[in-house]
Amino acid sequence: MGLNTPPDLRIRLGPLVLKNPVVTASGTFGYGTEFLPYLDLARLGGICVKGLSLKPRKGNPPPRTAEIPAGMLNAIGLANVGVEAFVAKKLPALRRFDTAVIANVFGETVEEYAEVARILSAAEGVAALELNISCPNTEKGGRVFGCDPDGTSRVVSAVRRVSSLPLIVKLTPNVTDILTVARAAVESGADILSLVNTFLGIAVDLEGRRMVLANGVGGVSGPAIRPQALYLVHRVCSEVKVPVMGMGGIMSASDALEFLLVGARAVQVGTANFVDPAASVKILDGIAAYFQSRGIPSVAHFVGSLKESRQSTIFST
């Protein structure tokens, strides 16, 4: 490849082919069309829309976001219009753009996950499903599906039975061993894994002596979590042989390239969208410029090319 030859940004993640490796993360990019004043949606590799439930949800009361050092804390509560309204009113507008529409799915029961997935799978224009398993299982006393390999298996298996679309499972980092959950997802039918979702955290108002968020606990995202997210992505890419989408504090092209370097085949841009609504395309341009300046012919040539000088070891203190 010469320096004047544009790199091939296409990338394959199992059954899902993306025009480039930059995808916007669920919950940070609305339903996509809200960002039309700021960027060309067709330039993106994919859009992962706001999480969809069987019925509309109002979410948590405000305040439900807070700025923290090097990131943000949110407890939006998965507010959304519901899957039927999405298919009828939001999805048609997205079909006009040459980009993969990834529908994020969640539920409070296994049956809800399966029904939302069934409705989306029958709709025109959905390229893949992403399962948010960081949700409480109301039938099992509120235990989060994704913290439990058995809960993960039940959700993924149920969705796999009703959908032939590429199936992405989004992993929570709030577990003791992410590999156990990752393997359970793959064994149950996941084609792709995406990680990480937000870490749990709180913020307190010292003068008021109360929680900042009305919900109390929220999800931590942004640059603060990037080293931990990168570690978990590297670990899963090293041990589980399915394609991975990496995310967690990606604010620049350099950040995204680090995730690709450790083995992720695509990245999701989240919190950066709140700082700069055009962040995703700027990151894409930066990736392309990096490859071209170094004569790297394609994304596929770069993914997983990390040089490890010694065996990685986990130390405890």
Image: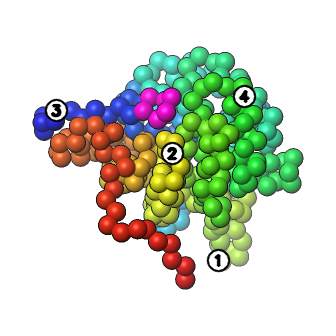
How crowded is the residue under tag 2: few (<14 C-alpha within 10 Å), some, or many (20+)?
few
Question: Do the numbered discs 1 and 2 sit on residues whose CB atoms are within 8 Å?
Answer: no
The answer to which of 63 and 302 lies nearer the viewer is: 302
Question: Do the numbered discs 3 and 2 sit on residues whose CB atoms are within 8 Å?
Answer: no
Looking at marks 3 and 2 on the same chain, the residue that comes earlier in the sequence is marked by: 3
Label 3 element class? loop
Answer whether residue 43 is magenta in the image: no
Looking at marks 2 and 4 on the same chain, the residue that comes earlier in the sequence is marked by: 4
Looking at marks 4 and 3 on the same chain, the residue that comes earlier in the sequence is marked by: 3
Answer whether residue 14 is magenta in the image: yes
The answer to which of 33 and 110 lies nearer the viewer is: 110
Estimate the x, y position of residue 251 in percent, counting from the top left: 40, 53
Hey, what amino acid is under mark 1? Leu
Q: Which mark is residue 5?
A: 3
Looking at marks 1 and 4 on the same chain, the residue that comes earlier in the sequence is marked by: 4
Check the image and report above or below for 39 versus 293: above
Q: Which residue is mark 1?
A: 206
Q: Which residue is mark 2?
A: 241
- For marks 2 and 4, give the one nearer the viewer: 2
Real-space Cα separation, disc 1 to disc 3, in angstroms = 56 Å
Hey, what amino acid is under mark 2? Lys
Q: Which residue is mark 4?
A: 161
Range of magenta residues:
12-17
The quarter of the picture where the C terminus appears is bottom right
- For marks 4 and 3, give the one nearer the viewer: 4
Question: Do the numbered discs 1 and 4 sit on residues whose CB atoms are within 8 Å?
Answer: no
Label 1 element class? loop
Q: At 75% from the left edge and 34% from the top edge, which residue is drawn?
A: 158
